[in-house]
Image: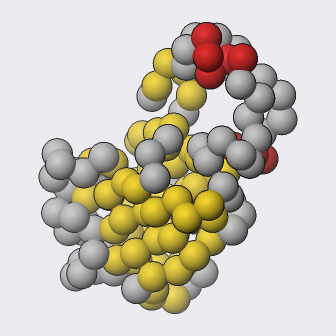
């Protein structure tokens, strides 16, 4: 989790910010949440990944998410053995333009929520899941 600053609090969350929230579930249980601000993040088992998930079904570097424009994220498989699945189909690469979810490996679900969907201000000091 990330604690928000005064600047964050004063910024109205909108599609122009390019922010999104990423939540990681293992076997249906929320295990981690991140506020993503960078244009690219990697998901995998190793510490070099911005989103590290220690699950044997994930590759060391399993997937990459790239923010292409406000509200548009591309998900790419980085050559993983167990794949990425969205809407029941294995994908190598796909662009999403609204809130979405996908599975990596066999047991890990990733939910992405664009913060343009959130209305209002985020209070100072609030922990953002």
Residue 96 versus residue 33: which sits nearer the camera?
96
Up-down relation of residue 37 to residue 103 (above or below): above
**What colour scheme has been applied to the protein in the rendered image?**
secondary structure
Residue 105 versus residue 117: which sits nearer the camera?
117
Image position, residue 52 (x, y; %): 27, 48
Tell me the residue at 30%/46% (across/down). Answer: 50
Exactly how many numbered labels are in the figure? 0
Tell me the residue at 42%/40% (across/down). Answer: 32
Q: Quadrant of residue 126?
A: top right
Up-down relation of residue 99 to residue 117 (above or below): below
Residue 123 versus residue 86: which sits nearer the camera?
123
Up-down relation of residue 4 to residue 108 (above or below): above
Image position, residue 36 (x, y; %): 49, 43
Q: Is residue 81 left or right of residue 24?
A: left
Q: From the image, which quarter does the C terminus lie in?
A: top right
Decide if residue 107 is in sight here. no
Q: From the image, which quarter does the N terminus lie in?
A: top left
Image position, residue 25 (x, y; %): 46, 52
Tell me the residue at 71%/64% (across/down). Answer: 98
Q: Is residue 59 left or right of residue 123?
A: left
Q: Is residue 66 left or right of residue 63?
A: right
Q: Is residue 8 left or right of residue 118?
A: left
Decide if residue 129 is in sight here. yes
In the picture as drawn, the residue positioned furthest to the right comes out as: 119
Tell me the residue at 52%/48% (across/down). Answer: 22
């Amino acid at each position: 989790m990330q604690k928000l600053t005064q600047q964050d609090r004063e910024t109205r969350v909108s599609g122009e910010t390019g922010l999104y929230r990423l939540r990681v579930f293992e076997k249906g249980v929320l295990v981690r949440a991140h506020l993503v601000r960078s244009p690219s993040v990697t998901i995998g088992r190793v510490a070099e990944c911005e989103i590290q998930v220690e699950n044997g079904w994930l590759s060391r570097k399993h997937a990459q998410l790239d923010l292409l424009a406000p509200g548009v994220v591309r998900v790419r498989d980085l050559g993983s053995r167990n794949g990425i699945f969205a809407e029941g189909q294995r994908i190598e690469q796909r662009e999403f333009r609204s809130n979405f979810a996908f599975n990596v490996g066999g047991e890990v679900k990733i939910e992405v929520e664009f913060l343009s969907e959130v209305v209002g201000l985020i209070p100072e000091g609030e922990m953002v899941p």
